[in-house]
Image (spheres, grey):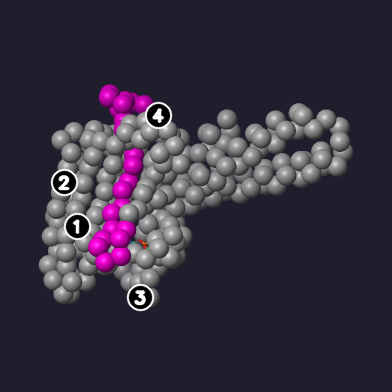
Amino acid sequence: LETRLRQADKMQALGTMAGGVAHDFNNLLTAILGSLHLAGKRVGDEPGLRRLMHNATLAAERGSALTRRLLSFSRQNELAPRRVSVNRLILGMGDLLARTLGTPPGGALELRRDLAADPGAVRVDPDQFELALINLCINARDAMPEGGTITLATADAPIGPDEIPELPAGAYVRVSVADTGTGMPPEVLTRVLEPFFTTKEVGKGTGLGLPMVYGLVRQSGGGLAIDSVPGKGTRVSLYLPAAAAGDEESVPPGDGTARACA
Ligand code: ADP
């Protein structure tokens, strides 16, 4: 049963991740197709150029069809976004978290919370978001075999234009998990979002934790940032768009399909 559970977890992580990647990819293809369309109006009748652009359009359309297949695969475990108070969610997961994390072999683990007075609400699938935070805390624990401190923090985090390349400017809520562990050298840090990249022993790591977290935040309209200093520790910050007051009834955020069709 345990193996089956682990496999189910893996498939779920893959699905969530595929959704996030497909979402990003779709936006790129939409931009490519749009540019080709506009350029097509200007090239006039030069046959060689027309053929090249036609080929490029066909390739981008094939990519778009593939992405849709990836999205429908990821929808097998469709997200159910709801209005969620991040503080309440974090306060609610205390016992579960402590039990899941256990005690590291060489020391004690301190779990701290540093919650902003009113970071506001976000729209996210609460179960998946909790799973994402647990994943981050497990990574934090694994980076502190001698023990240390894990700090779960929330903050109001407005983002300005072009501050984080993939995120439009606006009001965001930041939820971060920080540890006082080993940190990551640059060659690890640049690869951690790659599916199946792990530095853990076989059987201990799948390399799907961070890609799953990334997929979830992307599908929820947010992004993530990782700060890591070797020998000092790591902080993973998740940015989710702040939910407007009283938008309980609003349509869930797009999953990329709608945008691709626009
Ligand atoms: P897994 O935990 O299964 O290896 P992840 O995608 O969650 O998969 O993480 C990938 C790799 O990133 C880890 O194997 C580890 O090398 C590195 N990593 C992730 N989180 C941390 C952290 N908090 N501190 C140090 N290294 C980390």
Q: Which residue is mark 4?
A: 251
**Element assignment for label 4:** loop
Q: Which residue is mark 1?
A: 150
Q: Classify residue 202 as left or right of residue 22.
A: left
Depth check, front residue: 160 or 37: 160
Against 262, residue 237 (above or below) is below
Where residue 201 is drawn, which disc sits there? 3
Q: Quadrant of the N terminus?
A: bottom left
Disc 2/disc 3 C-alpha distance (Å)? 32 Å
Q: Nearer the viewer, residue 206 or 24?
A: 24
Q: Would residue 33 be visible to someone looking at this image?
A: yes
Q: Is residue 71 visible?
A: no
Q: Is mark 3 within 8 Å of ligand 1?
A: no
Which callout, 3 or 4, points at the residue further toward the start of the chain? 3
x and y percent of residue 70 in the render? 54, 50
Say how many tags the image has.
4
Q: On residue 104, which mark appears? A: none
Q: Position of residue 52 (x, y in %)?
A: 79, 44
- What crowding class fits label 4: few (fewer than 14 Cα within 10 Å), some (14-19), or many (20 or more)? few
The residues colored magenta run: 228-251
Q: Secondary structure at mark 1?
A: strand
